[in-house]
Image: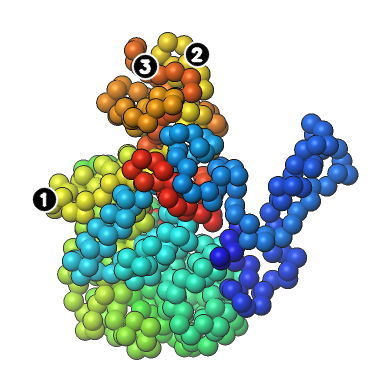
Amino acid sequence: MTQPPGHMAGLTAGQGSSPILPAATRTVVPHRDAVAAAAHVGRSTPPGVAFAFVADDGTEPKGHAGQHAGVLGGNVLREDYPLPVCVLRAAVLERNLDRFQRYCDDAGVLLCPHAKTTMSPELFGRQLAAGAWGLTFATGPQVRVAREYGVPRIFYANQLVGAADVRFVSAELRRDPGFEFYCLVDSVDGVRLLAERVAAAQPGRPLNVLVEGGLPGGRCGVRDVGTAIEVAEAVRVSGGHLVLTGVEGFEGLVASHEPSRREPDAREFLAFLAEIAETLDARGQFGDGAAANDGEVLLTAGGSAYFDLAAEELKRVQLSRPVQVVLRSGCYLAEDWGSYGDRLAEVHARTGSARPELEPAIEVWAQVLSVPEPGLVILSAGRRDFGQDAGNPVALAHVRRGEAGRRPLRDAGWRMAGVSDQHAHMAVPEGHGVAVGDLVALGPSHPCTTFDKWRVLHLVDEDYTVTGMARTYF
Ligand SMILES: Cc1ncc(COP(=O)(O)O)c(C=O)c1O
């Protein structure tokens, strides 16, 4: 089994290679015996009684599932696992994988899923096996995890700035001729710094860069075509250390715009990316050395909310060289019970089609701890267990203690009225029919910020028997 790299993952240059940093900086995790021994000392560990740490030796991460992480075949509803527990419905996940990949294939675009959504190598493997062109990441530590698990093609949807990150990527490019890497540039200063750092790190081949276009008031990215030309020119004179291979942008930021503005603003932004590409192409600024993608110009946008618009607008672009459109959706895999579900309904309405038919796969199961007032049920999961950045989770289902039948709660008038670290405060109608010890499933909105609460998510079949594990490395 591949060793889980832990939180400080990837301080080594990859499996079998020598560490870039000294061994002393490698991942350490508290060993459970050491923690237990310290706990026996007393209520609080007196000064001088050091916690013992051992090097990460590949033991299963314990996560929220305690000793039961890694144990398959138990049943969540039968309380074989400690609660709360985050589950992925395996059959739904498989359908989403397949349906979204087929949607991309039929649209003639490549899929390079944003893997920061899950940070789970098990799921990286499933996405690549389903036909993904590569995987997208957003930070240096994420890239290290990806390389530790052998991801062969990485799209770094961000500005690559940090010295350690440039060294790591360069070392990987040098070490592994099969490794492909792409990153973004949006300023002359950034290009110069990157070129300088790449020159010092000597990857042995030029680094593929794409000009990033940005939304006004948004994040990174050039705001006008003139700046894109200056950035491209800086790449051209970068001494052969960088090669311009395309144009990138992220239209998903329009989600914060006023609802009636979202689609027109997304289209306008995508047209801006197209204009950058056409202008740079007319000036002959895309590099000949883009051997990694056979001289094709990559045009890439597309999260999980406006991917139909990204495919439609970018597929229109015609350049003097072949164009390859790449979508980078991440949330499509687990979907959700809130904002992405709403956005998907808008995609269907916009396109007049039910495709891609994605369903929410992620649920957090909690226990009823108390019914302290007639209209209040307290559950054993809180903000440590689910994300709230796109709204509180909804109540999905109720299972009576000792039974297996699921009573749907979506239309039962339940509302998450408050959230503590470890508790959800559910406002419930009279006659809610719930007792202490029962189980309740919660459906989060925005999967990214629920995945990152768990070291292990349990893959379950339709009866909630655990059939697999998805470990995460955030
Ligand atoms: C640059 C970039 N690309 C792609 C994505 C994936 O979008 P989504 O999370 O909607 O799937 C994100 C998400 O934040 C992003 O920031």
Quadrant occupied by the N terminus: bottom right
Q: Quadrant of ligand 1?
A: bottom left
Q: Nearer the viewer, mark 1 or mark 2?
A: 2
Q: Earlier in the sequence, mark 1 or mark 2?
A: 1
Measured in 3D between alpha carbons, the distance from the residue under mark 3 to the one under mark 2, in whole angstroms, is: 14 Å
Horizontal arrangement in the rendering, residue 466 relative to residue 310 (left or right): right
**Residue at the image point whose x is 79% and y is 51% from the top:** 52
In the rendered structure, which amino acid carries the disc numbered 3?
A: Gly
Look at mark 3 in the image and give the residue it sits on: 433
Look at mark 1 in the image and give the residue it sits on: 352
Q: Are marks 1 and 2 in contact (CB under 8 Å)?
A: no
**Local crowd size for mark 3, using a 10 Å CA cut-off: few (<14), some (14–19), many (≥20):** few
Measured in 3D between alpha carbons, the distance from the residue under mark 3 to the one under mark 1, in whole angstroms, is: 40 Å
Measured in 3D between alpha carbons, the distance from the residue under mark 1 to the one under mark 2, in whole angstroms, is: 48 Å
> Outermost residue, right direction?
48
Q: Where in the figure is residue 382, as x and y percent of width and height?
A: 50, 32
Q: Earlier in the sequence, mark 3 or mark 2?
A: 2
Mark 3: secondary structure: loop
Q: In the rendered image, which quarter is residue 161 located in?
A: bottom right
Look at mark 2 in the image and give the residue it sits on: 372
Q: Where in the figure is residue 252, as x and y percent of width and height?
A: 32, 53
